[in-house]
């Protein structure tokens, strides 16, 4: 059974693409045949973070318009055998996508026996975001610990409830997961950021993980390598934990407390 | 050839206002409508309505004395748009005169023989109960509208309206969400968005919530914003009701 997971947020710049790349990579590393689709048509980013930008020939819009085959369009990841990237088009806009077209693509991916389809949603609540979440079985709602991001996440949860295929067909609702990114415990302590408890209370959905703010996220993005592969970094470990929880494993949440600085990191930190 | 989803013929349920006619005198209907429309001018303008003629079926002679076309003209005069008429007897002179499509029965159809559960032959044989026991009039005429029940959180940007009934929400009402009802509103969870009860004018309606953090609360058009809600009441269970012109917020 193929599972479709949308990574969404409403607000831009909260880490959807970083999260999509890491979730897809994490699932593939655990042996699942996974594809990650960039729905941000017009603003192609996922290929950069996945480090395959030079290998893009065809894109999602070509596939939707039946100008290319699935085999031609999917880019095979260099690091993992069972991971594929379906890039967005840079020269088109979101109007090029249609529900019927996406439905055909989803059907092809299911026939190709993918275990997971990860949909990297664009920001906003317009057509692109609605297309990305339409076919979702599960949703990872990415939220930063700030009021505006939480408000937008609440809005996108409402849209998931009313505009997803599952809601329109009266099927079981989309399973919602909360992923808090850019969490900085010391700034939470100073009252500059919302705490995990505040966010969970406001959004009232189960917590999938807390990704601490970490320089390794930016470094990995620039290097074209999903941060989950950086096993030394707190962010990489936190994504790895989130994958375990996504697969149903109970794991205690980490990275919620202020880390005490040791003498060495004080000196060299 | 796949069917064209853009053009579909389907059954559906829609909410319409219905106008019950229980009197065979067009002048009385006219007066009563003028009074209702004047209470909320504009609200009823061009509203499609179902003309419910079933109350008249009780007395066919009176019913047949009513001038159907005059009745329709009177309704149209008040800017209401009669779409269909509900009647128990489609062949009556009144039914023929109303010039709109007819449907069987009204919103509050009286129980008929068909509605009595069918009993098995054995049951019927030793049935001692009178089957056609008349139902007391208070029992049939009091229509209970079920409340609208929402058992998921209401999210920012969502709007929920319970027409002619109570609204019960199990879960929170997020900031930027709006819950509206013609009757009472009950929120079993934090109320952080806007809640407006009695929107069609019922001043005796109330809002109940488990944690009052609302951006705005309103009863029959009288509203208060969060800033004017005393600090000590915020975040606590509360009931909100109208006391004369003042919106009263009390701990629950």
Image (cartoon, helix red, strand yellow):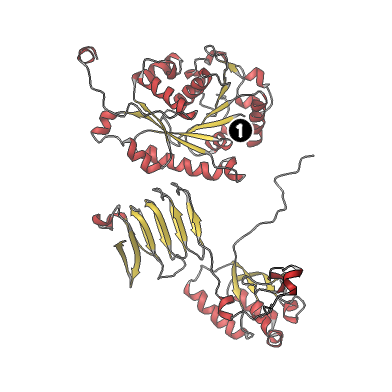
Which residue does the numbered mark 1 point to in the structure image? A97
Q: Quadrant of the C terminus of chain B?
A: bottom left
- The outermost residue toward the right is B1
Above or below for B40 versus A259: below
Q: Residue at x 54, y 36 (%)?
A: A133
Taking depth in this image into account, of B125 and A107 the one nearest to the observer is B125
Q: Is residue B180 left or right of residue B252?
A: right
Q: What secondary structure is found at the residue carrying circle 1?
A: loop
Taking depth in this image into account, of A160 and B95 the one nearest to the observer is A160
Residue B154, given in percent of the width and then of the height, sits at 45, 49
Taking depth in this image into account, of A152 and A171 the one nearest to the observer is A171
Q: Is residue B207 left or right of residue A76?
A: left
Q: Residue at x 69, y 80 (%)?
A: B68
Q: Residues within 10 Å of mark 1 (few under 14, many from 20)?
A: many
Q: Is residue A164 left or right of residue A237?
A: right
Quarter occupied by residue A155:
top left
Residue B9, given in percent of the width and then of the height, sits at 72, 53
Quarter occupied by residue B71:
bottom right
Q: Quadrant of the N terminus of chain B?
A: top right
């Amino acid at each position: 059974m193929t599972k479709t997971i949308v990574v969404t947020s409403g607000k831009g710049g909260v880490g959807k693409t970083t999260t999509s790349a890491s979730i897809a990579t994490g699932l593939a590393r655990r042996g699942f045949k996974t594809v990650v689709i960039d729905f941000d048509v017009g603003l192609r980013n996922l290929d950069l973070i996945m480090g395959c930008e030079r290998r893009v020939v065809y894109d999602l819009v070509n596939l939707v318009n039946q100008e290319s085959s699935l085999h031609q369009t999917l880019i095979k990841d260099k690091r993992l055998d069972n991971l594929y990237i379906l890039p967005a088009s840079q020269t088109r806009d979101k109007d090029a996508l249609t529900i019927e077209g996406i439905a055909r693509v989803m059907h092809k991916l299911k026939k190709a026996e993918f275990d997971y389809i990860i949909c990297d949603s664009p920001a906003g609540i317009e057509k692109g975001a609605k297309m990305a979440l339409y076919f979702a079985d599960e949703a990872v709602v990415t939220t930063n610990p700030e009021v505006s991001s939480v408000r937008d996440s609440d809005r996108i949860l409402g849209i998931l409830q009313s505009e997803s295929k599952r809601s329109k067909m009266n099927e079981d609702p989309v399973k919602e997961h909360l992923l808090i990114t850019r969490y900085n415990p010391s700034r939470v302590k100073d009252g500059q950021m919302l705490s995990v408890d505040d966010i969970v209370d406001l959004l009232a959905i189960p917590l999938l993980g807390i990704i601490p703010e970490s320089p390794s996220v930016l470094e990995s993005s620039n290097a074209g390598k999903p941060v989950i592969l950086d096993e030394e970094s707190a962010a990489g470990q936190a994504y790895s934990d989130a994958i375990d929880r996504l697969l149903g494993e109970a794991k205690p949440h980490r990275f919620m407390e202020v880390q005490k600085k040791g003498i060495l990191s004080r000196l060299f930190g | 050839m796949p069917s064209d989803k853009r053009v579909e013929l389907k059954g559906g349920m829609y909410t319409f206002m219905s106008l019950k006619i229980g009197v065979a005198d067009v002048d009385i209907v006219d007066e009563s409508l003028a009074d209702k429309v004047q209470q909320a001018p504009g609200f009823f303008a061009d509203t499609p309505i179902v003309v419910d003629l079933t109350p008249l079926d009780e007395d066919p002679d009176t019913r047949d004395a009513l001038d159907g076309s005059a009745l329709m003209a009177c309704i149209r005069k008040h800017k209401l748009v009669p779409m269909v008429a509900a009647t128990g007897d489609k062949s009556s002179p009144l039914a023929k005169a109303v010039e709109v499509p007819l449907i069987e029965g009204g919103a509050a159809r009286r129980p008929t023989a068909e509605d009595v559960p069918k009993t098995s032959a054995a049951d019927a044989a030793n049935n001692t109960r009178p089957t056609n026991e008349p139902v007391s009039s208070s029992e049939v005429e009091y229509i209970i509208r079920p409340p609208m029940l929402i058992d998921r959180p209401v999210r920012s940007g969502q709007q929920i309206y319970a027409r002619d009934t109570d609204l019960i929400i199990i879960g929170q009402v997020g900031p930027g969400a709006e819950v509206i009802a013609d009757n009472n509103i009950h929120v079993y969870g934090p109320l952080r968005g806007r809640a407006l009860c009695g929107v069609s004018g019922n001043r005796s309606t109330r809002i109940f919530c488990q944690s009052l953090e609302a951006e705005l609360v309103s009863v029959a058009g009288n509203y208060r914003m969060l800033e004017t809600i005393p600090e000590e009441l915020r975040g606590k269970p509360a009931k909100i009701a109208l006391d004369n012109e003042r919106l009263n917020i009390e701990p629950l």
